[in-house]
Amino acid sequence: MLKQQLNFKLSQKLSPQQIQLMKMIQLPTQAFEQRISQELEENPALEGGKEESDEFDDEFNNDEFDDNYDEGNEVIETDINVDDYLSDDEVPSYKLSANNYSADDEERQMPYAAGTSFTQNLMQQLSTYRMDDEEEEIATFLVGSVDESGYIRRELQDIVDDLAFTQNVYTTIEKVKKVLKIVQELDPAGVAARDLQECLLIQLERKEHNPAVALAIEIIEDSFDHFSKKHYKKLIQKFDITEDQLRDAIHEIEGLNPKPGGTYSGNNRIVEHVVPDFAIKIVDGELDLTLNGRNAPELHVSHDYTNMLKGYKESKDKSKAQKDAVMFIKQKLDAAKWFIDAIKQRQQTLFVTMNAIMHYQEEFFLSGDERKLRPMILKDIADEIHMDVSTVSRVANSKYVDTPYGTKLIKEFFSESMKNDQGEDVSTKEIKKILEITISEENKRKPLTDDKLAKILLEKGYPIARRTIAKYREQLDLPVARLRKEI
């Protein structure tokens, strides 16, 4: 026998508008401007620029049209309250404006020259060499195999096979090697090398020969492994040389370029232009925060569309076509009104969050000393401004702040805490900075091992395990002691 039962379930779900607002909060300034442009294109009821009159606020009252749209039991939501899930903090409008940007300023961008690609440059050089048809096809194929770093990272046998299958060129490894030597004569020096050792040798061979260069060639040819691992004593013994001679040879090698393709000036790369979302200045010893004015665009609801709705209300003849048209207009007006409210809420959320971060890290922003960064996690700021942790995370993600000490990524101000020998909470950023300074001041002839670094930091009041030292050192992109050694 079937049993029927009734269950009650209470759940919270974000509306589509709330989800869209969350996404808008996450956008940095440039992406936010693109989002505004997209909305202006898609919604004719939304207009940019200064508003001619404020009378539309009285005219555009969605409640006036509710009776006309409730026909056929259709209910349309008109008001979207975005404050239900964000902070209720009131921020004066002047705080949301930027002092360093003007709405009337002309946006000027520096055009980028297209130039020629790295491959095109190599092909132009190749055209000056005299070769037969087969050699020319092989050379062209080899140039096409050069990666952006300037290397050919493929086995010669694979190249021979590809030439046969794709170019219908049947050749031998010896012939490819011969043509490869020609390609390796192109600029920049070291291009088309198959590995780092060959790349360095090509560059050394082009240098004016002297005793230091000759020794450098011997070291790279015969003892590349000892050189790469900085086994300097073994090199001195093997080549029967003095420290000064080895130092001169290493100086020649250090002046070479391990990535010849990376320095090509005409190489087309994506240029990342960072636009600070906030600016912090020190005025009379006090911190002053401003929001980039590009986050506060001037938008308003179209007067033409509000007049259409007003005309419909006054019209006595309401055909189905008119109702369908005005339904569309009202949806666009609702969307425009929500978008404008969402932008204002975004401004407030960004400002309130960054303001809390600024005051939490006040010592750093006043001094610029990274050792004064306090331990700070997302929850600290979320509790301070009474918002959700996810909202703080969205504000900190991919956004920058212009400070007197340079443009900083906001999420870099967040760090975990550790206890020092006095039981006080200190930021891991502070420990990393001290570790970095300690390594920079070490004797490069006898660099400090991770064990010695752990002892030094313990003496300074930071009890940290050797494994933690190794983890922080790797995060700072600092090599192990052996690879930091210098002659």
Image (cartoon, grey):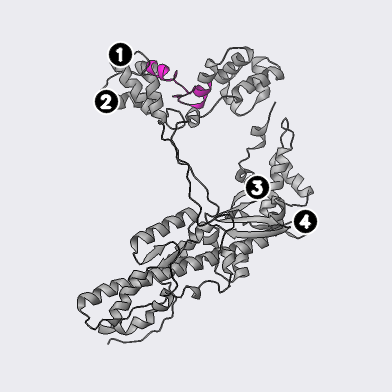
What amino acid type should be assigned to the residue bearing mark 4? Asp
What amino acid type should be assigned to the residue bearing mark 3? Arg
Say which of 477 and 99 sits in front.
99
Badge 3 local density, few (<14 within 10 Å), some, or many (20+)? few
What distance separates the C-alpha of mark 2 from that of mark 3? 53 Å
Residue at the image position 38 percent from the left and 79 percent from the top? 62
Which quarter of the rendering shows the C terminus? top right
Left or right: 148 as drawn, with respect to 459:
left
> For residue 197: magenta?
yes
Say which of 12 and 27 sits in front.
27
Q: Which residue is mark 3?
A: 467
Q: Secondary structure at mark 3?
A: helix
Discs 3, 1 touching: Cβ within 8 Å: no
Q: Secondary structure at mark 1?
A: loop
Q: Which residue is mark 1?
A: 132
What distance separates the C-alpha of mark 4 from that of mark 2? 69 Å
- Nearest to N terminus: mark 3 or mark 4: 4
Whether residue 154 can be seen here: no
Rendering coords of residue 311 (x, y %): 29, 77
Rendering coords of residue 461 (x, y %): 77, 52
Q: Which range is magenta?
A: 178-200
